[in-house]
Amino acid sequence: MHAHFVRHVFHLHSHDAYSFAVTEYGSQRFHCRGGGHTCRAGMIMAFNPDDPHDGESAEELGFTYRIMHIGPEVVRDMLDDITGGRARMPLFDRPVVDDPLLARALRRLHPALVGGADPLVREERLTAAVTAMVRRNASSRTGSAAPRELSGGGRTTAARRVRALLDESYERDLTAQDLADAAGCSRFALYRAFRAVYGMPPSDYQRLLRLRKARGLLVAGRSVAEAAALSGFADQAHFHRWFVRSFGVTPGVFGRAAAGSV
């Protein structure tokens, strides 16, 4: 949820999931685990499953926040993948966390979850956010284990296998598990390997291939809508946004310029 509250008062309640919220503007006060807390702009609220808490604005103009609820089974699957099943479930002792790096990871995760992002984007950002939360803010009682890493040769081999799959099937909605199966390693290990070898995450490389394909289609005289659909973009707005970010002009301007040069 992305919301702004002014007068609303949350009654004491809890969730059956881990809940992470980033306050964007204003501040919220609440009671949790026997104490009172205030989460100001840029700070994070971290609730374990079944943590009772209430909440209300601490300022006259209210507060704006983004909150995400992540099921324990999702966190368990992710930590098992990262550590080979050697990590216990995390607990968070501090209901309020001041961690700019984690706040950034959560702000990037939220739109990916609610905005229909590609599976690779959602999974990569979810892994980044949960990993940052656990490593930097979980209590020492969790018994966290070191992540599994590939050796130099294994890293290169895994990265090349994933790149070959993306080169062949970039227009498909591939998942992190699809890439892990191709690489022969865990999802976390393949992500680290690909980034180390090629300098970007698999989702960025997949998007780059789609943009290159779309650019070629525009040069060939296809419409912007056709270029977006045939290259694998979910919708024309998504295609337009990333084309401008990558090439500095809109697809329409590029297409007209390409047509005039023929």
Image (tube, rainbow, N blue to C red):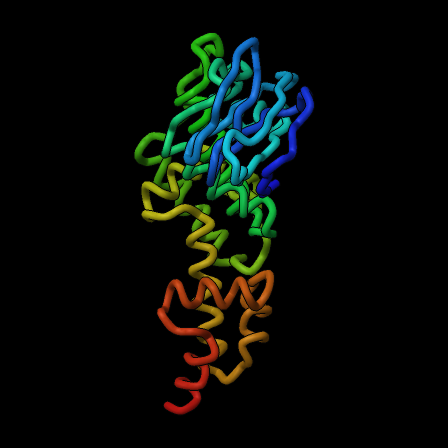
Along the line of sight, which residue is nearer the eye, 189 or 1?
1
Q: Position of residue 72 (x, y in %)?
A: 62, 23
Residue 32: which quarter of the image?
top right
Left or right of 101? Residue 3 is right
Give percent across and percent down for residue 20. Answer: 54, 29
Taking the spot 47% from the left edge, 22% from the top edge, the residue there is: 96
Residue 75 position (above or below residue 191) = above
Foreground residue, 181 or 74?
74
Residue at 50 percent of width and 52 percent of height = 165
Q: Is residue 230 above or below residue 78?
A: below
Residue 106 sits above or below residue 142 on the image? below
Tell me if residue 181 can be seen: no
Q: Position of residue 212 (x, y in %)?
A: 43, 67
Number of numbered discs present? 0
Q: Is 166 drawn above or below residue 122 in the view shown?
A: below
Instruction: Please tell me which residue is depicted at 54% across the width and 73% down the height of the picture.
Output: 227
Q: What's the residue at 43%, 80% (across, down)?
A: 253
Regarding residue 55, the answer to whether it shows in the image is yes
Report the front residue among 168 and 228: 228
Q: Residue furthest front?
A: 60
Which quarter of the figure is the N terminus placed in?
top right
Q: Is residue 196 left or right of residue 187?
A: left
Residue 128 located left or right of residue 152: right
Q: Image quadrant for the C terminus? A: bottom left
**Rendered location of residue 12, percent (x, y):** 67, 20
Nearest the eye: 83 or 31: 31
